[in-house]
Image: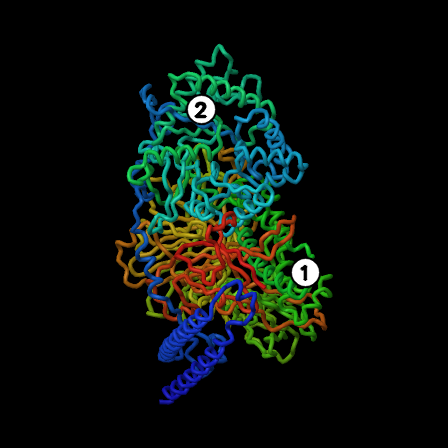
Amino acid sequence: MKLSRQFTVFGSAIFCVVIFSLYLMLDRGHLDYPKNPRREGSFPQGQLSMLQEKIDHLERLLAENNEIISNIRDSVINLSESVEDGSKSSLGNFSRGAGSPLLPSKQLSLKVDPEDCLFASQSGSQNSDVQMLDVYSLIPFDNPDGGVWKQGFDITYKSNEWDTKPLQVFVVPHSHNDPGWLKTFDEYFKEKTQYIFNNMVIKLKEDSRRKFIWSEISYLSKWWDTLDIQKKDAVKSLIENGQFEIVTGGWVMPDEAAAHYFAIIDQLIEGHQWLEKNLGVKPRSGWAIDPFGHSPTMAYLLNRAGFSHMLIQRVHYAVKKHFALHKTLEFFWRQNWDLGSVTDIFCHMMPFYSYDIPHTCGPDPKICCQFDFKRLPGGRFGCPWGVPPETIYLGNVQNRAEMLLDQYRKKSKLFRTAVVLAPLGDDFRYCERTEWDHQFKNYQLLFDYMNSQPRYNVKIQFGTLSDYFDALDKEDASSRKNSQSMFPVLSGDFFTYADRDDHYWSGYFTSRPFYKRMDRILESHLRSAEILYYFALQQAQKYKINGFLSSSYYAMLTEARRNIGLFQHHDAITGTAKDWVVVDYGTRLFHSLMNLKMIIGYSALLLLLKDKQSYESYTSVIVLEMESKQKSQSSLPQKNIIKLGAEPRYLVVYNPSEQERNSMVSLYVSSPAVQVSSASGKPVEIQMSAVWDTTSTISQMAYEISFLVQMPPLGLKVYTLLESTSSNPHLAEYVLYNGNIENKGIFNIKSIKSTEEDIILENSFIKLRFGQSGLMEEMISKEDGKRHEVRVQFSWYGTTSKKDKSGAYLFLPDGEAKPYVYTTHPLVRVQRGRFYSDVTCFFEHVTHSVRLYNIQGIEGQSVEVSNIVDIRKEHNREIAMRISSNINSQNRFYTDLNGYQIQPRMTMSKLPLQANVYPMTTMAYIQDAEHRLTLLSAQSLGVSSLKSGQIEVIMDRRLMQDDNRGLEQGVHDNKITANLFRILLEKRTVVNTEEDKKPVSYPSLLSHITSSFLNHPFLTMTEKIPVPTLQLLGEFSPLLSSLPCDIHLLNLRTIQSKVDGKYSDEAALILHRKGFDCRFSSRGTGLQCSTTQGKISIQKLFHKFTVVSLVPSSLSLMHSPPDARNMSEINLSPMEISTFRIQLR
């Protein structure tokens, strides 16, 4: 009876609050449209439309009100259920009331618009002619000897085939310049690349028929900075007359497996912005000849940037052969999820083994090599097939021309048109003037001869990539029957790559994992710095804060973009460069991390200062310091110990998510007598944990404090810290198994020699059961009490005893993984606390920790797993973590591509083990009709599902030999490496198992947001030295509310000005609407957002800022739509990534 009375009172109170808030909202309706004439000018509206807007506004408020009431009803139901569940659960004791930190007062359940669920259920019924999953099922992978084209077949033709339509050949000179590989970026530039450019200017001017293409802007910009005006003009004129073409035009030619879409887009923008400012050029054709496998994400991003054509090269040799047989080497690449054809981009796949000259003129490398005139006798290197090139002269031109033409004709037989692309180049080619002369002069003689002989029916010339694609488009257009293109539509991806035999390139998915993790930390810091900097810049302009406006922050930001961009190169993030080159990349990343922390600190300071004018007086020293510090490019970050005193010091928390977020902050402090207060002076509840100096020694110098913060989206919140004897933290309790502890300090610690009993951790969502060695064995869902086997184990892979062994690129294991063996039980430490509990076990090579957060909402529903891996003493071994479950996934599993989309996978018994390993950037999952088990990852690694119910991730590899792909070393610069994951078990509702066979799948919203939180944790800063005069606001909250649950703010990136090294008033607002699967129980997910069919009202987006203008743009800012106008509403389709030029005031 007493309970129902409580509920009645509670319900009535809430109802009153709702009515009052509705009144306030209506009242605010009158104030929502300030009479600022400049604002009116940018969004012209007559009186009628004003009225219409007000009516719409009222309707929205009523709808919001209904939503609030239904949310409250759900909350009340949830609360009553949790009360009925009895006081066993940690929430059972309801009398704690709203003050309980486990019950954020705004605990609303997620509202998903039913229309937003349609996309995932329709998707995948699309109409591709070629689906890569089917291709894999069809191909026998038997690798017979194909003759001169080893991995192909004999090609024949009839000599009269070109009588009606002559063969058109474009020979495209190119030079592939790795921004770091066997030498550092700077070494390559100094020794090779600058000479390529210098000679290009001279040699292309000698003959207007000569052409050259270039892709890496990182090198072009470095060279450009050394030029005088005259030389710059010469380059511009070569571009204008079509002799020199920029292809792709990204900062680098990025890897497509380990790179995250945030960074791929960022390096593309950096390249395109540089080109716009310095050359006024907009690339239109993509060129990716060296990444080790290809992702459809890249095709989508190029399409969104305004490209119509692209080229790829490194694809499994059996797939190339299959495509050559069916003449599908040229196709429209469409996204798996596309219900129409809006994502189509034309793609050319090079048919042969390599992009070098022996493998690009035709099927016979022995002949093609004779037309690489850098290999003329007397040069530094010749042809491995034993027959050298001959200089062309009158006496041999006919014989040589016919030999070469035969190769071009054979190559053309693999395609559907009479237009042939023949790239002419290799790594760091065209360095010396002699090479320019040998290649261009000898080929010109061959061209002139062929073109002069009508019997050959050939038209041959030097061309750029776009010259080829233009000729192809013309041919396609002239042969189109009822607007149907002659080219097929393909969907899917091109992983995992093999270039010969069983040599699968799945090793690099994990190689050098230390830097793969560091890369993601940097990306998150860069995004945070970009967003805070742009907000701070607007305020600095408003208040005329010169100290900020004239600072070097924008130059630092640009350098950080470029350093992270450089690291996306396909020999950097892949872990496939020489040791000292890796150190060079690491040093650049480390240097930028320091700078980004500084930009975040100073931007936050400006945004929070009560008196903005006082900013200048705080710039001589760092005021706000990040709570963690990395000592060097090769060490793990460590938390700073905050020295407490009687003087309070500020603590600032930043939430990089576009969602309101209730999560935990942890800091190290110097004293157990600590008080944390909110901005209003209210003390905050604290969990105090021990800081461990070694596995069984507690630090007497530092204590960890953890507390909950409810953060506004993209917002900052201020707390104070001080030493206080009246503080009363919740001390964590410890149990140590198989170990002893000397000095317990203030903590309650039990030591147990060994245990027969299982270890249990639980929160209000999940209960976990661990075995005696401290490894998780079972997850029990509190929602239905169901027990699920979820067993974590470690294992080792060795390398094969054959001649070819694993290296930086290749994974060539000696069979299945062997279990990780330990003779005695490891030391296991169990911590139970107010806000989190964890189990840590210490093995020789891994410190493995599983943590459960005692928090309502997102953070409490998954299990955090962190591994500190150290295999520095091992030889030819790779360490894996395997999660085994009773999910009946059979041979299907799902991995993400670049953190952007999910690609279904099939483990195939006809393929070797290493072929069934795929890249995982942010997640992998397995599922059956009832459940889905997801492994979310904070770093890119290789993943597989070799048996039903299993997910296995390779965490580090140490290999003592080269794998013969040019690196000439093994991988033995291993570091102590941190890997961070979350395990999420979700219950599926109403699933048709046939649907699981579709070529497309989506994470749930809970999974998306958990992944986002994992990749973008709160950033905490503390006042370095207490400054008595410093006065900060309580919070900075730039958004009016959370963005819709399915919309991610990818970046808010200040755009460069026309002046060197300066910023403009505009930023690129990049948004991504995620595709998600609704068929999961969403009760009490704690998502405090809703979905809106991809609509965002601009005027209801920002708080404290006015939107001066918002104009749509192409992804990388190269193009503006012809009808681009100021928008008042953003409208995104599922999966869409869009860029807008925004100006705030």
The residue carrying pointer 1 sits among few (fewer than 14), some (14 to 19) or many (20 or more) residues within 10 Å by Cα, namely: many
The residue carrying pointer 2 sits among few (fewer than 14), some (14 to 19) or many (20 or more) residues within 10 Å by Cα, namely: many
In terms of depth relative to the viewer, which is nearer, 631 or 183? Answer: 183
Mark before the other along the chain sequence, 2 or 1? 2
Number of dots carrying numbers: 2
Q: Which residue is tagged 1?
A: 548
In terms of depth relative to the viewer, which is nearer, 753 or 65? Answer: 65
Q: Is residue 848 visible?
A: no
For residue 488, which quarter of the picture? top left
Q: CA distance from mark 2 to mark 1?
A: 58 Å
Q: Label 2: state its secondary structure.
A: strand
- Picture coordinates of residue 344 (x, y %)? 38, 45
- Picture coordinates of residue 376 (x, y %)? 54, 18
Residue drawn at (38%, 69%) of the image:
111
For residue 241, which quarter of the picture? top right
Q: Work out whether 317 lies above or below 80.
A: above
Quadrant, the C terminus: bottom right
Q: Mark 2: which amino acid? A: Ile
Residue drawn at (35%, 50%) of the image:
338
In terms of depth relative to the viewer, which is nearer, 682 or 635? Answer: 682
Q: Work out whether 527 lies above or below 725.
A: above
- Picture coordinates of residue 584 (x, y %)? 62, 43
Residue drawn at (43%, 85%) of the image:
16
- In screen coordinates, is 214 left or right of 7? right
- Picture coordinates of residue 975 (x, y %)? 57, 48
For residue 1129, which quarter of the picture? bottom left
Q: Which residue is tagged 2?
A: 460
Q: Label 1: state its secondary structure.
A: helix
Q: Are marks 2 and 1 in contact (CB under 8 Å)?
A: no
